[in-house]
Image (cartoon, helix red, strand yellow):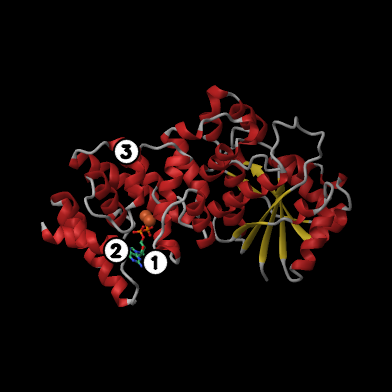
Amino acid sequence: MMKIGIYGGTFDPPHLGHMEAACAAMGHLNLDHLLLIPSQIPPHKFLPRETADGSARMEMAALMADGIGPRAEVSPLEFLRSGPSYTVDTVRALREQYPDGDFYLLMGTDMFLSFTEWKDAANIAKEVTLAPFSREESGSHELFALQREKLSGELGARVEIIPLPKIYPISSTKIRHLLGNKDTVEEGGSHLWAAVYGYVLIHGLYGVEVDLKNLSNAQLRAVVCSMLKAKRIPHVQGTEETAVSLARHWGVDVQKARRAAILHDCTKHWSLEEHLALCERYQIPLTELERGSGKLLHAKTAAVLAEHRFGEDPEVCAAIECHTTGKPNMTTLDKVLYMADYVEPTRSFPGVEELRRLSWDNLDQALCVGIETTIGELSEKNAPIHENTQMTLAQLKGT
Ligand code: DGI
Ligand code: FE
Ligand code: FE
C-alpha cells in the first residue's frame, strides 16, 4: 500500500522549519509520497500587503517540494475550493484520488492536542493515521502520550508521533516582518529555501523592496534557484566555484566570472516558445538552427535577462551569451566561463580529469579540446554544428 503524507498549512511563506518537518516525516514514516496542501487564507486574517496570494503560495510550496525531493509534490485541492476547507473534506477528496492510500496526516502540537474539536474528528481518524510532530526538547512527551491514549480510546485513532530533533526557531509571521523591513531582508531570506527566497525577491512579496538590478551575490543565487529545478543547482554551484578559481588563476575579474557563472543557465528549463518570445521581444537576430533549438537559445536568453532584468556588466552578458558555442575572439572571461561550465566538479565524462588539468595549464588548448569533444559528440548524433562552434575551433587551430 502506498504511504502518503498529507501536510497542510498556509505556507505564507513556506520556510525551512516546514521543510525540516517534512523531511523528518518522510524519513520517519518512510513515505512514498508527500502532499503539501496550501490552504485558503480567510481574507481577514492578515493585512493585504503582508500576505501572498494563493497562486504565489502554491508556487512557493512547489519550489520547496522540488527541494524536498521527487516524492514530494503540491496538491491544489484546498486552493481550488472557493472558501476555507475543513480537513475532513480534504481527506475525503484524497480518498477518492487514492482509494488504496495509507494516509498520514501531519500536524503540529496544538492541532494534535485539540484534535477532538475538529469537525468530524472521528471520520478523519478512520481515514488517516495522525502524525503529530513532537519537538524533542519541548518536554511535552507526557502530554502526547495522554492524548494518544485518549484519541485511540475515544475515536479508535491511530497515532504515529514524528520526533523533531530541534525546534526551528522562527515563524512565518516573523519571517514576513523581516522581509518587509529593508535592513533585514537577507535575514528573512536565510530562513527560506533558496528557491523560495528567490521567488519572493522576484515578485516583491511581503513588502520586499530590492532592486533586481542590484542584487547581492546571495540574492542572485536565490533568484536563479527559483528559476531552475533543484537537480540543476549543484551544476550551477560547481560552475561558480570553478569559474572563480579559474578567474583568479588567469587574472580575470573574479566578481564578473562569479556573476556570469551564477546566471549562465538561468533559462535552461524554458520551453522553446519562451525562448523565442523573449528573443522576439528584444529583437535578437536568430539563425535557422537557433530558432529550432532551446539548447542553443538558453545561452542567448540568459544573456538577455542578465542585461535587461539583472543589469549585469556587458562583459558578463557577453560571456553568458557564448557559453554554449564559443565565438571568434573570445575574451579570457568568456573562456573561463566556457571551461568552468565544461569541467566543474559534477561533470563526469571520459577525459574530464585531463581537461581539468589543461584548463589550469593552457586555457586555449583546453578550449580547443572542449570544442572538439562537443563537435565529436554532436557528430555522432548527426546534430548540426553551430557556426560559432566551427569558427571558434578554426580560429584556435589557426593560431
Ligand atoms: O547548459 P549546459 O548543459 O550546462 O551546457 P552547455 O550550455 O554547454 O550546453 C550543452 C548543450 O548544447 C549540449 O546538449 C550540446 C549543445 N550544443 C553545444 N554546441 C552546439 C550544440 N548543439 C548544436 N546543435 N550545435 C552546436 O554547435
Ligand atoms: Fe548552458
Ligand atoms: Fe551550464
Q: Position of residue 103 (x, y in %)?
A: 72, 61
> Residue visible at 57% across and 50% down?
63
Give amino acid for label 3: Lys
The answer to whether marks 2 and 1 mark residues whose Cβ atoms lie closer than 8 Å is: yes
Question: Is 238 situated above or below 143?
Answer: below
Question: Is 291 situated above or below 78?
Answer: below
Give amino acid for label 1: Leu
Query: Label 2 crowding class (10 Å Cα cut-off): few <14, some 14-19, many 20+?
Result: some
Ligand 2's quadrant is bottom left
The answer to whether marks 2 and 3 mark residues whose Cβ atoms lie closer than 8 Å is: no
Q: Which residue is mark 2?
A: 387
**Mark 2 vs mark 1, CA separation in Å:** 9 Å
Q: Of helix, strand and loop, which one carries label 2?
A: helix
Q: Nearer the viewer, residue 239 or 296?
A: 296
Q: Specify whether residue 72 is in view.
A: yes
Q: Which residue is mark 1?
A: 289
Q: Of helix, strand and loop, which one carries label 3?
A: helix
- Quadrant (top left/top right/bottom left/bottom right) for the C terminus: bottom left
Rendering quarter of residue 391: bottom left
- Of all residues, the one furthest to the left in this rendering is 399
Q: Position of residue 58 (x, y in %)?
A: 67, 49
Residue 256 - label:
3
* Tag nearer the camera, 1 or 3: 1
Q: Confirm or reject: label 2 Cβ below 8 Å from ligand 1.
A: no
> Residue visible at 45% across and 31% down?
214
Q: Confirm or reject: label 1 Cβ below 8 Å from ligand 1.
A: yes
Rendering quarter of residue 358: bottom left
Q: Position of residue 74 (x, y in %)?
A: 66, 55
**Mark 2 vs mark 3, CA separation in Å:** 26 Å
